[in-house]
Image: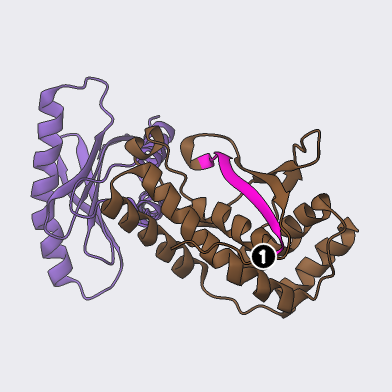
Amino acid sequence: MKIRCIAILNRQDIPVYMRSFDETLNEDSAVKYQYLAHTSVDVIEERMANTKSTDLYLGLLQTVGELAIYGYVLNTGARIILVISVPESIVRSAAIREIFQQIHAAYIALVCNPFNNEQGKLVSSKFDLIVSELGRVHSN
Amino acid sequence: MEKQYKTIGEEAWKNNTEKINAELFIFTYGSLVVQLVKDYEDYTAVNKQLDKMGYNIGVRLVDDMMARTSLERCSGFSATAEVIAKIGFKLFLNVVPTVTNWSADAKEFSLILDDNPLNDFCELPPKAVTDGLWYSNVLCGVIRGALEMMQMQTEVVYVRDVLRGDDVSEIRVKLVRMLDEEVPASDD
């Protein structure tokens, strides 16, 4: 399983953080992931309207070609999107859930930073480090 | 003598202090610093304000500390250093910095803080780092104010800070002179 992209959108569905782990970094891949994040938002809204459970983990949202997209909402309404390349073996949802929980914990640390700018993009070297580490660990 | 200070500090922390939620305290201090940065827009001025605020806190805090711990007069400046580290910091922040780097004339020392609770969750923007913001500069003011109430005029500055990329935080305390009985100048 290889993590391809981690994106965070805020309540108003504006992307505040986008990080892709492609080897070939070019314009296309950035746009592609933004597009994927936006299409996933519709699925998220639908899931959240239908289900009554308060589980933060939304599970598999959609598959596009060889990519699988998972979603997770935070209590404040922000959404985390995880794009992975579909592996040969089955991916356990527990593993994905754990990745989301790590991102959530890092996000909380980032939000608690008094110098954080609420409206703009999330800029934080510590958060970048954690996300890079996650990407590296799961790139086998 | 050292062991005694340590136990006094721990006893006082356990029994004579009311605790508050750490996150509340950290966030309050964080928004204070951010607001100062927005108001002054000059990091040196912010450092100075934090030091002034710390001074005003320190002159009052030392009476509080004395009331809780009923200490006797310190035998010398090195005893004072130990009291600041093992009792003062322990009582109010629940951390104990190490006292090191004594100068040859025993008038200067360093407090090394491995872990400063005020720094939790905080990341300085790059401009703050280059322009020299000392985030926890209030601590320097507190030490200076407290010592002035104890009839010692000191200069207290930050020399290293983990938020700026150093491995530890270091505060340097320098004794300028002992004060005779006189009313300390108030900072307005």
In this rendering, the count of numbered labels is: 1
Q: Residue at x 71, y 61 (%)?
A: B151
Q: Residue at x 73, y 77 (%)?
A: B68
In front of the other: B6 or A52: B6
In front of the other: B143 or B28: B143
Instruction: Look at the image and tell me whether residue B47 can be seen.
Output: yes
B2 versus A38 height, above or below? below
In front of the other: A82 or A118: A118
Q: Which residue is mark 1?
A: B182
Please tell me whether the stretch drawn in magenta is mainly helix, strand or loop: strand
Q: Residues within 10 Å of mark 1 (few under 14, many from 20)?
A: few
Is A17 part of what is drawn in magenta? no
Which color scheme did the rendering employ for the protein?
by chain
Amino acid type indicated by mark 1: Glu
Colour brown, chain? B
Query: Residue B70 appears in which quarter of the rendering?
Result: bottom right
B74 versus B156 height, above or below? below
Query: Residue B14 appears in which quarter of the rendering?
Result: bottom right
Q: Is residue A49 left or right of residue B50?
A: left
Tell me where the magenta segment starts and ends, as one range: B150-162
Q: Is residue B183 left or right of residue B165?
A: right
Q: Quadrant of the C terminus of chain B?
A: bottom left
Colour purple, chain? A
Q: Quadrant of the N terminus of chain B?
A: bottom right
Instruction: Look at the image and tell me whether residue A90 can be seen.
Output: no
Q: Residue at x 19, y 34 (%)?
A: A66
Is B156 part of what is drawn in magenta? yes
Q: Position of residue A28 (x, y in %)?
A: 10, 26
Q: Secondary structure at mark 1?
A: loop
Specify the farthest residue to the right: B1
